[in-house]
Image (cartoon, rainbow, N blue to C red):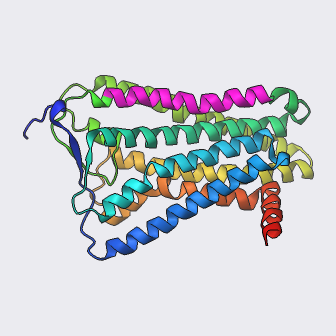
Amino acid sequence: MITINSTQVSYFTLGAYFDTELFKYLLFVIIVIFYILILCANVFLIVVICMHRSLHEPMYIFLCSLFMNELYGSTGLFPFLLIQILSDVHTVSAPFCFLQIFCVYTYVCVEFLNLAVMSYDRYLAICHPLQYNRLMTSTKVAVLIAVTWLFPFLAIIVLVSLSSSLQLCGNIIDKVYCGNYAIVKLACSDTTVNNIYGLIYTVISIIIPFILIFYTYMKILKVCFSGSKQTRQKAVSTCTPHLASLLNFSFGCCFQILQSRFDMSSVPNMLAILLSLYFLTCQPLFTPVLYGLKMSKIRNTCKRLLSADV
């Protein structure tokens, strides 16, 4: 293998793309439509929440933050994906590659932290309803949202800085978009610091929020089984979309981690590509559709708004 110093790697080649001939134009149209649907669904619900005072409650403010993250994550992928589909040479400049890593990884971290904050909010509302307004103040909401966004941005800046300083032995990434671990695997230099930091980051940004979510829902279920029918109905109506969103996103992330860490050569190429893109393509549309249909207050407000326009 020819050694390429890190200063000489000005671009990366995305090796997972293959020639689809005329099918690429159909694929391009499908992804454009999908991206437009994501933009419209999330922007519409953000506007609905912001414009209607009845939705200015902690739960809906956290939802608004979640919808903004879906816009952020999908924008970090879709325009890039569309350009690559139509391109005959699948290369990306090193700075842009690290920028995409920053966007994708912050999106994942914000998503998990936002879901954890929302589970904490539901825990207070269902398990401590009388103290809810005292415990979930506007100041606390602002602090939780600030931490949800600031921590991932700071953490990923460090992650990208560590990766961009590595000496690399190649520039071929076997993916359809840039991934941090795919670049770390190309390193000639020692990656111990990268691996340790990656492990610490994973524990703080994914495992701890997941444990918090699991704990809060165990408490919520305990209250539901011992509470009244009305309490159970409230828990089901507000927690079902949250759990569905969490499970959907976790599934996509788990496959992405498995694909990055293990040999997936036995998996058909097209299936591997679709599954690797799942958490970045389906979640941004799944979230607004799910919450828009399941949350009665949002659904009714949307119906009134649409009927008024008609």
Measured as percent of width and height from the top left, residue 50 is found at 74, 46
- Front residue (pair 121, 126): 121
Q: Was residue 103 drawn as part of the magenta stretch in this picture? A: no
Measured as percent of width and height from the top left, residue 292 is found at 72, 59
Residue sitting at 81 percent across and 58 percent down?
A: 301
Residue 267 visible, this angle: no
Residue that extends furthest to the left in the rendered view of this protein: 2
Q: Quadrant of residue 163?
A: top left
In the displayed structure, would residue 289 be above or below residue 110?
Answer: below
Q: Which residues are magenta?
A: 138-162
Residue sitting at 63 percent across and 45 percent down?
A: 66
Please name the predominant secondary structure of the magenta segment in the image.
helix
User: Left or right: where does residue 2 sit relative to residue 137?
Assistant: left
User: Left or right: where does residue 288 sit relative to residue 110?
Assistant: right
Q: Was residue 150 drawn as part of the magenta stretch in this picture? A: yes
Residue that extends furthest to the bottom in the rendered view of this protein: 22
